[in-house]
Amino acid sequence: MSATRYLPEDRGLESLETAADRCRGCPLYADATQTVFGHGPPGAALMLVGEQPGDQEDRAGLPFVGPAGRLLARALDEAGIDPALTYQTNAVKHFKFTRKGGKRRIHQKPSRTEVVACRPWLIAEIEAVRPRVIVCLGATAAQSLLGAAFRVSTQRGRVVELPSAVDVRLTPEPVVVPTVHPSSVLRDRSAGHDAAYRSFVDDLCGARDAYE
Ligand code: URA
């Protein structure tokens, strides 16, 4: 299971996006509405990688347009980063879900096999965008680029290098700043919500400092 054979020869963002529309590298294409490719200016200094499109992203065909995306945009803004100048994408390009009560689509975490199968698209996006810093939002994105043993809980906010096993052909290579997923901040309705949001903004400030 891999997306590799669906990658086009021309590795510009537009041809990648067109080719990704036809990807059958894992079974997730079958139930999703469409491939949700990354979005943002080529040459963006900051790339943000989420887990997978949610229900709204699957319908819109764009990443981070739902509630998690709105929290992300607010946090970026507070960190002094213009969201429109970032490239936003996901580790997995199709929405994985189960149906509840016939209609409602409930997000399902992608398997490690699906994440690895989709990784060639993410690597190709990194090579096409040439970001200075990649922020991994949550464990799925962090483990896609930093390995299955990577723990966001203990390493969040640090500036880490891409492991040599991830073959990104760029000089200099971008660095990675792992942090939590914005939906974990959204879901936190405890007394710690504000602190969780502040820590998320702090991690984004750290990412900004790494390319400014
Ligand atoms: N969550 C993600 O990880 N990505 C999106 O695009 C939206 C929600």
Image (cartoon, rainbow, N blue to C red):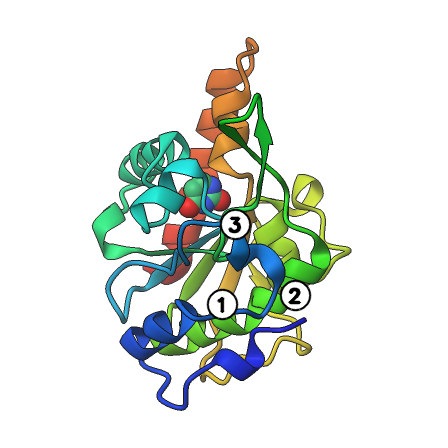
Q: Is residue 91 left or right of residue 209?
A: right
Viewed as shown, does residue 4 lie left or right of 130?
right
Residue name at image x 47 percent, y 50 percent: 32
Q: Is residue 38 left or right of residue 96?
A: left
Query: Where's the N terminus, which quadrant?
Result: bottom right
**Label 2 packing within 10 angstroms: few (<14), some (14-19), many (20+):** many
Marks 3 and 1, how far apart in space?
A: 21 Å
Q: In terms of secondary structure, where does tag 3 sit? A: loop
Residues at marks 1 and 2 touching, judged by CB atoms closer than 8 Å = no
Q: In this view, does 186 lie above or below 107?
A: above
Q: Is residue 203 above or below residue 94?
A: above
Q: Mark 2 points at which residue?
A: 116
Q: Residue furthest bottom?
A: 9
Judging by the rendered image, the residue that carries numbered circle 3 is: 31
Quadrant containing the C terminus is bottom left
Residue in the picture at 41% in, 58% down: 35
Residue position marked by numbered label 1 in the rendering: 122
